[in-house]
Amino acid sequence: MYLVKTPGWLRKIYPKLHWKMPNTDRAIYLTFDDGPHPFATPFVLDQLAKYGARASFFCVGENAKNNPELLARIRKEGHMLGNHTMHHVNGWKVADELYLQEVEAAAEWLPTGWFRPPYGRIRFRQEKQLTQHFPAIKIMMWDVLSGDFDVKLTGEDCAKNVIKNAAAGSVVVFHDSTKAWERMQVALPLVLAHFSKAGYRFLALPPAELHPNKN
């Protein structure tokens, strides 16, 4: 069970988290979770390049460690990096201390102030611990899910999810992963083409530094 469009009531429950970006510049913020991935990530980068698009990649630390050349390419081509924990842990299923350790471990490979909880699951205590340890951290959720992880959908379905629900300032989630590959490789080009034709730009999230608290 998941919501394609994030409802206002959920944003009110977690008011300190980031859900959208300012909608004044007719821009959409594409984000990609779980990479870098040996063939999905290069495909994404090639598609973005066709449209002069920038995006943000919330990488799993272990994947970042194992694919340094892809991490370097993401940076070189003007995209933003985000932390997605070291091993893609579910915050509802691990101890708070372990969750912080997972973020710290990933930060060694991903020294960025942007963080996204895997599955969007983070306890209030975990949020508090993260912001205490990393006072400048920005926890980015999303406005629209493509649903490319859902094996019941087609790539066209995923594209429709985004096209129907995204607007200026939307933060959209795709995945550069094996599980999502079949649907993402169809949906992403359709989304890029549709919104480009409609006059939108695709921007990366702004730079954000981590600044750990050393006290």
Image (tube, rainbow, N blue to C red):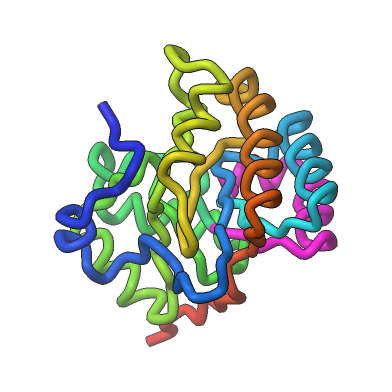
Inspect this view and state whether residue 16 appears.
Answer: yes
Magenta stretch, residue numbers = 59-82
* Along the line of sight, the residue nearer the viewer: 50 or 31: 50
Quadrant hosting residue 118? top left
* Residue 161 place in picture, x, y as percent: 45, 34
* Residue 84 place in picture, x, y as percent: 50, 50
Quadrant hosting residue 203? bottom right
Whether residue 152 appears in magenta in the rendering, the answer is no
| Residue occupying the far front of the picture | 198
Taking the spot 45% from the left edge, 30% from the top edge, the residue there is 147
Q: Quadrant of the C terminus?
A: bottom left
- Characterize the magenta stretch by its predominant secondary structure: helix
Viewed as shown, does residue 67 lie left or right of 55? right
Q: Is residue 150 above or below residue 115?
A: above
Taking the spot 78% from the left edge, 45% from the top edge, the residue there is 45
Viewed as shown, does residue 148 lie left or right of 64? left
Taking the spot 33% from the left edge, 73% from the top edge, the residue there is 131
Inspect this view and state whether residue 103 appears.
Answer: no
Q: Is residue 49 above or below residue 119?
A: below
Taking the spot 45% from the left edge, 68% from the top edge, the residue there is 21
* Residue 206 place in picture, x, y as percent: 59, 74
